[in-house]
Amino acid sequence: MALQTTQYQPIDRDFSSTTESELTSSASNKETHPVPPFENPIGNTKLPTLPSFNGINNPFRCPTVVVNDDLNDKPLGSKFKTPAKRLSYLRERKILGRNEESEIIDGLQYLLIIRHHAVFYYVKEKRSKKTMKFRIPHSMELNDMKLGINELCEIGEKWLVERGLCERCLEKEKSQKRIQRSKEAEVNGALICIMDSLGYSFEFKKLKDKQNRKTTPFVKTISITFPDGVNYSVEELKKFGKQYDAIMLQQDSRND
């Protein structure tokens, strides 16, 4: 599929005839943003518009959380007797879990683009050799509203705390790794909160009990229900994420 590069267009442009990825880059801040890259494979149902954003103290309404209690796994690697085998197993599980999180958050961005004409801006970052790139937007636009990364993080953390999924993490600013990890989880929460305001509902994997968390936990979606009542499993959501990642990688290779 051919990719094109074009100048930035207003967010309210007509995307009805757009079937290819149109990504641009800005020389001033080295950011890129995609617009709807291909035909919508899940319909063109017109959905409610996103409400106006009136400050971080009054963000999008928080969705009702449905938690699946059957997905609490036993301690990872407990069946391995030798430390080396257990370490190898845990390392592999960590890579798989990281890739799954990347696919989920890419899938959410994909849906916001193809169904709601959202625009995401990214700062070019180095890709990991072992895991799928975890794509965090520097900012986003939707329905004439622009949110920066700090606003997205505040919305996401507020949503997580208010739903009782975690407590506010006071230690997360003590290391760069914790800051980045918390940022990823909070942006994920913000995207879920935004999509809930558009009529979607979610079911999540239950978080394991953990005292004194040092990072904001990443809430994993296990199913998503569209405004028309159609339900998609996490595997289908991950397929959307993989397709989005493939398009972004192709665009990155063209810009190198």
Image (cartoon, grey):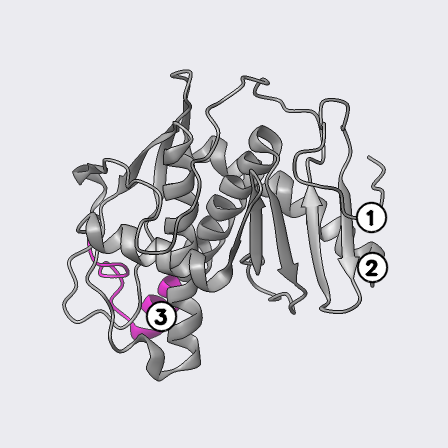
Q: Which residue is drawn at 78% across and 33% down?
A: 20
Give me the residue at 52% from left, 40% from top. Answer: 107
Would residue 191 appear left or right of 17 to someone viewing this image? left
Disc 3 on helix, strand or loop? helix
> On the rendered structure, is 107 left or right of 156?
right
The residue indicated by pointer 1 is 7
Which mark lies nearer to you, 2 or 3? Answer: 2
Position above or below: 174 against 111: below
* Disc nearer the start of the sequence (2/1): 1
Residue 91 visible (yes or no): no
Outermost front residue: 54
Quarter that holds the C terminus? bottom right
Q: In which quarter of the image is residue 169?
A: bottom left
Q: Quarter of the image holding residue 167? A: bottom left
Q: Nearer the viewer, residue 89 or 29?
A: 29
Q: Which of marks 2 and 1 is in front?
A: 1
Which residues make up the magenta segment? Answer: 74-92
Q: How far apart are marks 3 and 1 (CA)?
A: 49 Å
Q: Mark 3 points at which residue?
A: 87
The answer to whether residue 137 is above or below residue 171 is: above
Disc ID at residue 122: none
Residue 113 lies in quadrant: top right
| Mark 3 vs 1, N-terminal side | 1
Is residue 93 positioned above or below 21 on the image? Answer: below
Count how many numbered circles sit on residues in the image: 3
Q: Does the magenta stretch include residue 160?
A: no
Asked which secondary structure carries label 2, the reply is helix
